[in-house]
Amino acid sequence: MLCSILAGCGSDERVGHLPDAPPPPDAPLADAPSVDPPDAGPPSYDPTGGIDTPGEHGGAGCPDSDATTFTIAAGAVTSRLFDGIVTGAADSGVFYVRGTGNQELFGAIPTDASGNYKVTVPLFCGAQLVKLHWTNATCAYDIVYDVTTDTCADRDIRITLGWDAIGLDWELHLIKPGGRINDDATDCTWTSCIKTSPDWGVIGSTADDPSKDVDNTGAYGPENILLDGPEAGTYTVMVEHWNAAGSPLSDGTVILNVAGKPAVVQRMMDLAPYHVWTAATITFPGGIITPSSAVHDCSANWTGGCRDSIP
């Protein structure tokens, strides 16, 4: 099953890259016209095809893992490490998280030749299902976890970034209305939003400040930014391909869970190092998402990140 989701198996060095992970092969991109019947719901990005029962799901000849516990009371967290050993998988896997309502996100599970895997998965508030998915030439294998977080609240904006094996440190940014990339007062990113936050919205209140709870400086990701109680105006979601050693053929995906609406997925192919992708803007009130594929070459003004005055 994973071979079809990831657009084929074989010797192509691009196989297994996150942008070719779910949605299913025939689902429209987020900025493409819908071809679903008027009464159809949004497409699902679930790689398991809808398996919801906690536990292991596979069969003879499928991959297998050392997982034994499938109900997790995660506590007051916004992400959790999932790791272990999977045997017999043909490639890296895919994780998928479905929260209440329309909330969902996905990403890659880096898996080495010995079957060791480790990924920090962003979590929604409250009850949710976390699914880990691998395949081989015979069949698919899925682990389904029933996960609950507490002391939390649903966020008005949640942005999740993932990329492929040949990209090196794609960097996620959420820029407030009137702000600029890599300005620590107006841009939530690695310099301003990890274990600290810029003071947005009501001065002195932390309830409406952004946070970056998952950051990744290698391949695959994910990265994750959260914001609740956004002030009125237009926010900009931008992505840098940060490391010069990354491939210019690297592909990635931004998932936007905004204002309780169905997730919007934006894809970028061939983002070169020192280039910046504007993935979308988000306008409040209303949480209106405007997708974008604009790419800015910042290689002439790059010092620890893009220093051009964008957006």
Image: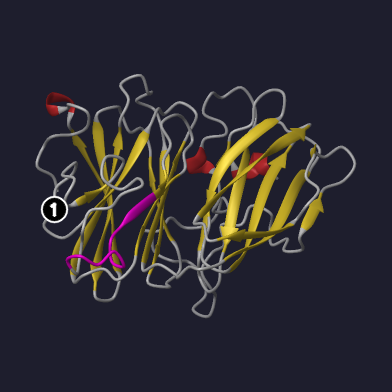
* Amino acid type indicated by mark 1: Gly
Q: Percent x, y for residue 196? A: 31, 49
State the residue position of label 1: 179
Tell me how many marks there are. 1
Q: Quadrant of residue 126?
A: bottom right
Task: Please tell me whether residue 264 is drawn above or below residue 184 in the rendered image.
Answer: below
Task: Locate residue 176 relative to residue 147 in the image: left or right.
Answer: left
Task: Locate residue 265 relative to residue 301 in the image: left or right.
Answer: right
Q: Mark yes or no: residue 8 visible.
A: no
Q: Percent x, y for residue 221? A: 46, 39
Q: Which residues are magenta?
A: 203-212
Dominant secondary-structure state across the stretch colored magenta: loop
Position of the N terminus by quadrant? top right
Q: Is residue 52 magenta?
A: no
Task: Please tell me whether residue 289 is drawn above or below residue 118 in the rendered image.
Answer: below
Camera-side residue of 108 and 119: 119
Q: Residue at 67% of width from left, 48% of height from top?
A: 132
**Mark 1 packing: few (<14 Cα in 10 Å), some, or many (20+)?**
some
Q: Mark yes or no: residue 297 visible.
A: yes
Residue extending farthest bottom: 39
